[in-house]
Image: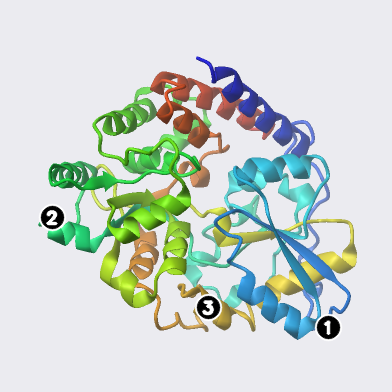
């Protein structure tokens, strides 16, 4: 196939970047975390003066607006300047490549899973955040749900961890006579076919921007994940090319071939997806929390409560797939500049301390802290997403030892460059490379 070499190159680049980040496959390389007492003593006052200090935060396309309010408030309180730099998609690959060459920001939005912290060689490149001053007030069920690698905390969770599930247009459902949300993946497909019969586009996908394509495969794997799928993949007892994952890839392709998606699926973007669901051009989108953030930028809470709902989905029922994404958390880098490193910690302490109430209010999002109430006006769909966390199962990113570019390969399948079998083979090859580079046994 014409694009097969590009897929191979992407895998090689990612593996090479990880090898550099992990010091030739040793994930424990780099300086050890500071002692607990030293870490605790190193947390500055959240509002201490930082005149003349400039901090840089790297953000992805879907997280670049998240820090606007809180960084402005921090600058006003401390005198520091904070620059937010958008790294082009694919964000994770771009960040890994930059860090591997020694280019580091002060902070970055980052997926706080063990596999992605390993991908940055957290021990060498990131500041430990143990004994962070906001941890005692973080909701107990969320305190250790993510952000840890080898029992050291490297990521600060700032918003509710993402859940893969289905956002739907309530008005479209009602107009088509759909009175209840689907109770399983197959029921969802029945609803989709009913909608298609009434001239409605059932699902909207954004293969032009690529990164969300993997959600369709992962929600189909929710039950298998609960039954230990990723443990088996991590130990080489099962692969992406075996029946469970390959069948999910094949089903996704078959549903596209059935015409259940938008006609412009190959080129449609993240922005197109939000506009389509909000306008009723399409009925459903399989997405994560950052998608709803886009909707909040387009409509007020009253409109969203009227039009947009959410339900988790899996083959057996309404089980969500837990995937803390890069818009949910930040990491602070070891830059070698002690003053800026302390200032980065201070920004996190401000964000999750005196600045948190205004942050969640401005973002209209769920509070993670027991001493900060969720603000009035948070849309019901977002509350439902947060509620689904209790029964959610881990995603590939949360449970696998490495995070291959499944989404890139699926996007190539959608454009016709790869078959499902080639998607599975390319993903497995890269997974094995990354797992070996990260020091996983059996690879």
Q: Does 24 sit left or right of 380 as displayed?
A: right
Does residue 436 sit above or below 308 in this rendering? above
Provide residue 256's location: percent of width, then percent of height: 30, 33
Q: Which residue is mark 2?
A: 176
For marks 1 and 2 on the same chain, the one whose residue lies earlier in the sequence: 1
Q: Are marks 1 and 3 in contact (CB under 8 Å)?
A: no
Task: Report the mark closest to the observer, 3 or 2.
Answer: 2
Q: Could you say whether the residue bearing mark 2 is in a helix, strand or loop? A: loop
Q: Give the distance between the C-alpha atoms of the residues marked 3 and 2, in whole angstroms.
A: 35 Å
- What colour scheme governs how the chains and residues are painted in the rendered image of this protein? rainbow
Q: Is residue 330 visible?
A: yes
What kind of element bears circle 3?
A: helix
Tell me the number on the disc at residue 49: 1
Q: Give the quadrant of the C terminus.
A: top right
- Residue 345 lies left or right of residue 413; in this view the side is right
Label drawn at residue 362: 3
Q: Residue visible at 19% across and 57% down?
A: 181
Q: Give the farthest residue toward the left.
A: 177
């Amino acid at each position: 196939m014409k694009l097969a070499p590009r897929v191979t190159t992407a895998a090689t680049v990612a593996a090479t970047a990880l090898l550099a980040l992990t010091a030739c496959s040793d994930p424990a390389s780099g300086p050890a975390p500071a002692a607990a007492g030293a870490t605790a003593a190193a947390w500055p006052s959240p509002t201490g003066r930082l005149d003349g200090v400039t901090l840089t935060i790297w953000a992805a396309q879907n997280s670049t607006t998240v820090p606007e309010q809180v960084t402005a408030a921090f600058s006003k309180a401390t005198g520091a300047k904070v620059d937010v730099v958008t790294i082009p998609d694919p964000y994770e690959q771009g960040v890994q490549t930059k860090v591997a060459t020694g280019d580091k920001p002060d902070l970055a939005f980052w997926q706080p899973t063990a596999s992605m912290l390993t991908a940055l060689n957290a021990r060498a490149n990131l500041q430990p955040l143990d004994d962070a001053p906001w941890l005692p007030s973080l909701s107990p069920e969320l305190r250790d749900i993510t952000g840890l690698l080898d029992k050291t905390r490297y990521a600060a969770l700032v918003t509710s961890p993402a859940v893969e599930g289905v956002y739907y247009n309530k008005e479209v459902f009602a107009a088509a006579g759909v009175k209840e949300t689907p109770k399983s993946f197959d029921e969802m497909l029945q609803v989709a076919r009913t909608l298609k019969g009434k001239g409605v586009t059932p699902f909207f996908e954004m293969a032009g921007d690529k990164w969300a394509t993997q959600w369709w495969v992962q929600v189909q794997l929710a039950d298998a994940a609960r039954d230990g799928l990723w443990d088996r993949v991590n130990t080489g007892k099962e692969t992406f090319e075996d029946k469970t994952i390959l069948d999910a890839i094949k089903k996704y392709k078959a549903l596209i071939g059935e015409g259940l998606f938008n006609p412009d699926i190959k080129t449609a973007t993240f922005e197109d997806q939000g506009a389509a669901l909000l306008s009723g051009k399409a009925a459903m989108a399989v997405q994560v929390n950052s998608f709803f953030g886009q909707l909040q930028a387009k409509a007020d809470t009253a409109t969203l409560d009227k039009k947009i709902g959410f339900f988790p989905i899996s083959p057996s029922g309404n089980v969500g797939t837990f995937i803390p994404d890069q818009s949910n958390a930040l990491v602070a880098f070891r830059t070698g500049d002690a003053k800026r490193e302390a200032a980065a910690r201070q920004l996190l302490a401000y964000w999750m301390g005196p600045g948190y109430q205004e942050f969640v209010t401005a973002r209209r999002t769920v509070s993670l802290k027991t001493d900060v109430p969720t603000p009035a006006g948070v849309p019901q769909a977002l509350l439902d997403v947060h509620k689904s966390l209790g029964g959610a199962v881990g995603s590939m990113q949360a449970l696998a030892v490495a995070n291959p570019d499944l989404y890139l390969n699926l996007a190539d399948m959608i454009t016709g460059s790869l078959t499902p079998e080639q998607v599975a083979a390319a993903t497995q090859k890269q997974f094995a490379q990354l797992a070996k580079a990260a020091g996983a046994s059996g690879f």
